[in-house]
C-alpha cells in the first residue's frame, strides 16, 4: 500500500530548544496513524510540519508522493487543499451558525455554486449526526457537538487526508467514542487517510492502524497499538502506567473498550 505521509529524520529547533530529534514515521494511504505522547512531546509540531506551516532544520516531509519540504507557499496551498484539519482548540467562529462554520472552507476555496455548498454542508453535518443543528449557534452546543461540527467542517471539501489535534480533549468517554467512530467510518466509507495526534490511549486503541510514540521530541515506539502494551521501552511504560483512563478498569480492559464500556 502506498505511503501517504512520511516524516524522515526530522530535526527541528524552536526558540533555541530541540523540539523534534531525528523523528521518522509514516502513514499508509487509507490508514489511520496515531501520534501519541505526553504534553509538550512535539505532537502538534509534527502536524505543523505535515501542513507545511513549519520547515524542519533537516530531514524531509512527504505528502501523497511529493517531497513538500522546500515547497513554495503556492505549492503548499495545493497540498493543503487535500487536507482537512480539526484544530486542538476546536475553534468554531462564535458569531456564525453551525452551517456557516462548516461552509467556511468551501466559501474560502471558491468555485462552488450555492446549492453545491448547501449540499456538502448538509452531507457533512449528516455524517456527524448534526444536520438538525445547522441553524444553531456554537454557544448552544455541548463540547462534544462542537467537536463534531469541527470534524464536519474538516471533511466538507472531501479531503483525502484528515489531521486531528487532540480530537477528544475535554470529552467524556461516550463522546470520545463517538469521535473515534467518526474517524473509523471516514476510513471505511471514504478511504480517508488520517493522522490523529493525542495523549488519549483509548482513542489510539480504537482507531490506530499504526502508532508512533513521541517522548520529548524523540520517537521511542512505532508499530501497532497492541504492541504499546508489550513495549519494553521505559517512556512508553511510564506513560501507559500513568494514564488515568487506563487505570480505571485495569490496563487492558480500559484500552480495548475505549473507556466507553
Ligand atoms: N514556536 C515555538 N517556539 C518555541 N518553542 C515552541 C514553539 N512551538 C512549540 N514549542 C515547544 O515545543 C515543544 C512541543 O510543543 P508541541 O505543541 O508540539 O507539543 P504537544 O505534544 O502538541 O503538546 P500538547 O499535548 O500539550 O498539545 C514544547 O516544549 C513547546 O513549548
Ligand atoms: Mg499539541
Image: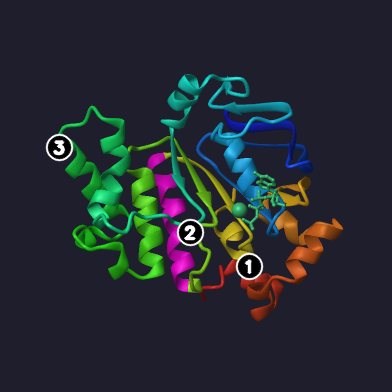
Q: Is residue 249 visible?
A: no
- Residue that label 1 marks: 255
Q: Residues within 10 Å of mark 2 (few under 14, many from 20)?
A: many
The single residue placed furthest to the front in the displayed view is 15
Q: Is residue 197 above or below residue 21?
A: below
> First in sequence: mark 2 or mark 1?
2
Residue 24, picture quadrant: top right
Name the residue: 72% across, 51% down.
Answer: 213
Q: Which residues are magenta?
A: 174-190
Q: Is residue 58 magenta?
A: no
Q: Main secondary structure of the magenta part?
A: helix
Q: Residues within 10 Å of mark 3 (few under 14, many from 20)?
A: few
Quadrant where the N terminus lies?
Answer: top right
Between 237 and 71, the one nearer to me in the picture: 71
- Disc 3/disc 1 C-alpha distance (Å): 44 Å
- Residue that label 3 marks: 114
> First in sequence: mark 2 or mark 3?
3
Whole-percent x and y of residue 134?
21, 57
Q: Is residue 24 visible?
A: yes
Whole-percent x and y of residue 202?
60, 65
Q: Is residue 188 magenta?
A: yes
Determine the secondary structure under disc 3.
helix
User: Which callout, 2 or 3, points to the residue nearer the camera?
Assistant: 3
Between 206 and 108, the one nearer to me in the picture: 108
Residue 180: image tag: 2
> First in sequence: mark 3 or mark 1?
3
Name the residue: 37% across, 58% down.
Answer: 148
The scheme the figure's colours follow is rainbow
Q: Is residue 172 left or right of residue 69?
A: left
Amino acid at each position: 500500500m502506498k505511503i501517504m505521509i512520511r516524516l524522515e529524520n526530522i530535526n527541528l529547533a524552536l526558540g533555541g530548544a530541540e523540539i523534534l530529534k531525528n523523528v521518522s514515521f509514516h502513514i499508509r494511504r487509507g490508514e489511520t496513524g496515531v501520534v501519541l505522547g505526553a504534553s509538550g512531546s512535539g505532537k502538534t509540531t509534527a502536524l505543523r510540519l505535515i501542513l507545511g506551516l513549519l520547515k524542519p532544520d533537516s530531514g524531509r516531509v512527504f505528502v501523497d508522493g511529493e517531497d513538500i519540504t522546500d515547497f513554495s507557499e503556492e505549492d503548499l496551498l495545493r497540498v493543503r487543499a487535500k487536507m482537512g484539519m480539526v484544530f486542538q482548540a476546536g475553534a468554531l467562529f462564535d458569531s456564525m451558525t453551525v452551517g456557516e462554520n462548516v461552509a467556511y472552507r468551501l466559501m474560502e476555496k471558491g468555485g462552488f455554486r450555492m446549492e453545491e455548498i448547501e449540499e456538502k454542508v448538509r452531507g457533512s453535518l449528516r455524517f456527524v449526526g448534526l444536520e438538525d443543528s445547522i441553524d444553531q449557534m456554537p454557544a448552544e452546543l455541548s463540547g462534544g457537538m462542537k467537536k463534531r461540527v469541527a470534524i464536519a467542517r474538516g471533511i466538507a471539501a472531501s479531503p483525502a487526508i484528515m489531521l486531528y489535534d487532540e480530537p477528544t480533549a475535554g470529552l467524556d468517554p461516550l463522546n470520545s467514542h463517538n469521535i473515534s467512530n467518526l474517524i473509523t467510518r471516514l476510513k471505511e466509507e471514504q478511504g480517508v487517510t488520517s493522522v490523529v495526534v493525542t495523549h488519549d490511549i483509548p482513542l489510539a486503541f480504537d482507531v490506530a492502524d499504526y502508532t508512533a510514540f513521541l517522548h520529548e521530541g524523540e520517537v521511542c515506539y512505532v508499530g501497532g497499538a497492541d504492541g504499546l502494551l508489550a513495549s519494553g521501552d521505559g517512556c512508553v511504560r511510564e506513560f501507559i502506567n500513568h494514564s488515568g483512563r487506563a487505570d480505571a478498569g485495569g490496563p487492558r480492559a480500559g484500552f480495548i473498550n475505549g473507556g466507553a464500556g
